[in-house]
Image: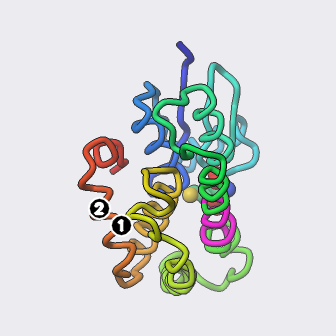
Amino acid sequence: MKEIILYTAAGSNCSQRVEWVLNYKQIPYAKIDVGESKRWKQYLHINPMGYVPCLSLSGVIIPESMAIIETLEEGYPTPTILGSNWQQRAEVRAMCEFVNGSLHMPQNRTILTLLRPDLDESAKQPLRADFLSRQLTTLSPRLFKQSQFAIGKQFTLADIFIASIYKKALQHGMAKQAPYQCHLSYLRKITAVAGAEPN
Ligand SMILES: N[C@@H](CCC(=O)N[C@@H](CS)C(=O)NCC(=O)O)C(=O)O
C-alpha cells in the first residue's frame, strides 16, 4: 500500500477537493495542516510552488489539485469520479479546469494581494464574494441539465469542484444562489457523497 500524505491548510477549498476524493474513494491518508506560518516556511521546501494542496504519494510530491486527483483516479479507479464515457470525462475535466482557472484563481490570496495591495484580508472578502457571485451566475445555465448532478447523471469531480467553490463563496459573504444551494442539498442526501465531504 502507498503512503499518502495530504498537505493542506484550514479553509483551503482546493485542498478540500482532494480530501473529498480521497474520502469518497476510501483511500487511507494522513493529513498535515501547513497553514500556520512556521510550518508554511518548512512546507515551501516540500512544495516550492507555494500553494496547497500537495500530495506525497510514496514520497513523490504532486502539487496542483487537478494533477493530484487525476493521479488518484489512475491508481484507484473505483469508484470513478470522472464519468463513465469519454464525452462525459471531457465535460467534467473542462468544468473542473474552468472552476480552477477562471473562478478560483483570480480571487486567490496571492493574486488578490498582487492586484489590490491596498486591501486587508477582511476588505478583500466582499470583492471575492462579488466576483464569485457573478461567475457562478454565468455558469449555472451550463450545469444541472441532465440531472441534479453538475454534469451528466452521476456524481463526478465536477460536483466536488462546484460545491467546494460555492461553499467558499458563501464563507466570503455571497448570498445563497438557488441552483447551487439545491445542488449542495442534493449531494448531502447521498450517503457515500455526504460521508466523504470534508468539514
Ligand atoms: N491551481 C491550484 C490552486 C491552489 C491554490 O490557489 N491554493 C490556495 C488555497 S485554496 C493557496 O494555497 N493559497 C495561498 C496563497 O495564495 O498564498 C490547485 O488547484 O491546487
Please report contact status of discs 2 and 1: CB closer than 8 Å, yes or no: yes
Crowding around mark 2 (Cα neighbors within 10 Å: few <14, some 14 to 19, many 20+) is some
Label for residue 28? none
Measuring 63% from the left and 30% from the top, which residue is drawn there?
74
Crowding around mark 1 (Cα neighbors within 10 Å: few <14, some 14 to 19, many 20+) is some
The spot of residue 184 in percent (x, y) is 33, 64
Residue farthest to the top, as pictured: 1
Measuring 51% from the left and 43% from the top, which residue is drawn there?
81
Q: Which residue is mark 2?
A: 186
Choose top left, top right, bottom left or bottom right for residue 191: top left
Label for residue 183? 1
Q: Is residue 104 left or right of residue 150?
A: right
Which stretch did the figure color magenta? Answer: 96-105
The spot of residue 64 in percent (x, y) is 67, 47
In front: 160, or 199?
160
- Residue 103 lies in magenta, yes or no? yes
Relative height, residue 66 to residue 102 (above, below):
above
The spot of residue 50 in percent (x, y) is 70, 50
Measuring 35% from the left and 48% from the top, which residue is drawn there?
197
Relative height, residue 21 to residue 105 (above, below):
above
In front: 90, or 54?
90
Q: Is residue 121 left or right of residue 177?
A: right
How many marks are shown on the rendered structure? Answer: 2
